[in-house]
Amino acid sequence: MPQTLPSFSAQDALVAIMVTVSVSDETIRTSELVAIERQVNHLPIFADYDMANVRDVARTVYKLMDEDDGLDTLFAMVRDALPDRLWETAYALACDVAAADGSIRQGELRLLEEIRHELSIDRLHAAAIERGARARHLTV
């Protein structure tokens, strides 16, 4: 892992997963940024998190995505920072960001699959999390 990368707190790791999903299709949509901001501002897990850290975490994610093994490095950093019990939380946040704009694109689907694999999310649990995200982001 490059020495210039900071280590993540648990909250930073969750933010990094959300930002990574947002950039996975090479287009960062406003709805995805709003979803990230909403999660950070309202979920209990971010109660003591400084919103200013989001920018630094995003810069780290962008830097990693420009590297050949950047995604592998990112997942290693996330696994190091997050206790196992929060891996499903990370996946749920990733699904919410992916679904925020009303459609999940191919790059996002591939990344969600990779997150499931890297964070050892059980397939049945993943399906339930995905279904919940879809239900939360439907429109009339």
Image: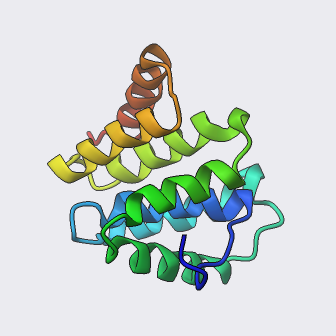
Q: Residue at x 59, y 79 (%)?
A: 5
Residue 99 location in percent, x, y?
A: 33, 46
Q: Is residue 54 left or right of residue 51?
A: left
- Identify whether 128 is placed above or below 113: above
- Identify whether 109 is placed above or below 13: above
Q: Residue at x 55, y 83 (%)?
A: 55
Residue 78 location in percent, x, y?
A: 59, 54
* Foreground residue among 64 and 89: 64
Q: Quadrant of the C terminus?
A: top left
Q: Is residue 113 left or right of residue 136?
A: left
* Foreground residue among 108 and 64: 64
* Foreground residue among 15 and 136: 15
Hey, which residue is sitting farthest right in the picture?
A: 48
Residue 73 makes an appearance in the image: yes
Q: Is residue 131 left or right of residue 27?
A: right
Q: Residue at x 31, y 39 (%)?
A: 138
Residue 123 location in percent, x, y?
A: 42, 18
Q: Quadrant of the N terminus?
A: bottom right
Residue 23 location in percent, x, y?
A: 32, 67
Residue 137 makes an appearance in the image: no
The chosen color scheme is rainbow
Q: Residue at x 51, y 78 (%)?
A: 60
Hey, which residue is sitting farthest top in the picture?
A: 124
Q: Is residue 35 left or right of residue 102?
A: right
